[in-house]
Image: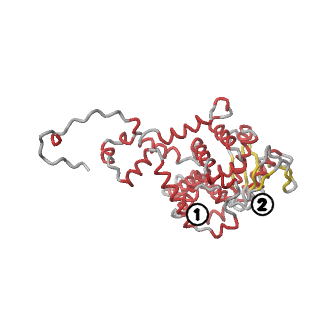
Amino acid sequence: MGEDMSDGHEHNGHENVPSRQRRRFPGISSRTYEHPADRSALVALRKLSGFDTVFKALSGLLPERSLRLLFLSDSVRVSDQQFSHLNVMLRDACYILDLEKVPPMYVSQDPQPNAMCIGLDEPIIVVTTGLVELLDEEEMRAVVGHEVGHALSGHSVYRTILLFLTSLAVRVAWIPLGNLAIMAIVTGLREWFRKSELSADRAGLLVGQDLQASMRGLMKIAGGNHLHEMNVDAFLAQAEEYEAGGDLRDSVLKILNVLPRSHPFTTVRAAELKKWAESRDYQRIMDGHYPRRDEDKDTSVRDSWRESANHYTTHVKSSKDPLMKLVTDLAGGAGDLGDRVRRGFGGFANPAQKPPRGPETPRPSDSPGDDRPPRDDS
């Protein structure tokens, strides 16, 4: 069962002072909060031609020690003496998710709000000054939990390789085909990392245990420190409008817009997190029923893959996106599909946007007194 954390709990000799009681999850497995799309995207990534070779090569070549020295020399390491409030949050998050070794955490001077978890042998968490200045304590607690979730899931390795390959792609852009091969892997890594962000958002909620704080943090990342000008319901309505709006052309543009990004769009993240927070799965976790780390070795890869496939099937069927509706129609053999194709991309617009059709003129074959058999339009 999960354990309640009371105010003033001592852990590893340091006092945690959460503003209220929080549930702790001893031995929790990262499978508890990992989004099905995260797992299936990682499976697809590992099947990408050449990925294993690149992964093994870079795992031995990447300058891990150099990376650590860089942050040690040019950033501020969080401790009891420096950014002590972040140090408390970090230890608190590790205690809640039962991560035994607390990763080093650095604050880097950068006005752009951002955070990341990188490293091959051991994870390092980095947050920017822009993020520290933007978020309040509870919002920041969710972000720290988000990064600790990345660490527990082992995401830092792939994130580090993504950063390196992105840089390398720029350097070798002049080499014929060389850049193309690298960009194929970079694209696969980005697709996986966008999905992994949905998992880490869930970990942040398990640590903060305050959905409103998580929502506020995402809104601030999207719109800055102007909460008095923003509204959670209106922000979530944007996500619905984004998914359902437009026609097939907009669906293609959405794909093109997201391809170069390492993170999903903020409204989409907020909507996904709220949906999970209201699910029975989340309530069961909060009640202390969740997969344990010591059971990970017994889990079936096939079952995990099946769960991911089921998630995608459900997502496609319930999606309001015109492209997803087309996929559903193709799978189901919709009767009006041919007509919609003939009318072009505009034929895939939201049905609510179609002009009303007038009364149909009877065809000669349907005229009174015509004794020919009716036409079969099936």
- In the image: residue 281, left or right of residue 133: left
Mark 2: few, some, or many residues within 10 Å (few <14, many ≥20)? few
Query: Where does the image place residue 351, in percent across and percent down from the top left?
Result: 39, 39
Observer-nearest residue: 55 or 102? 102
Q: Are marks 2 and 1 in contact (CB under 8 Å)?
A: no
* Apparent side of residue 217 relative to residue 309 in the rendered image (left or right): right
Q: Position of residue 274 (x, y in %)?
A: 61, 45
Q: Say what amino acid the circle numbered 1 marks.
A: Val
Could you tell whether 23 is left or right of 53 in the image? right
Residue in the picture at 73% in, 43% down: 140
For the residue marked with disc 2, what is the amino acid? Glu
Return the residue at label 1: 54
Q: Secondary structure at mark 1?
A: helix
Badge 2 is on which residue? Answer: 100
Nearest to the observer: residue 127 or residue 42? 42
Q: Looking at the picture, how far across and down is residue 283, in whole percent?
A: 66, 52
Question: Residue 151 appears in which quarter of the rendering?
Answer: bottom right
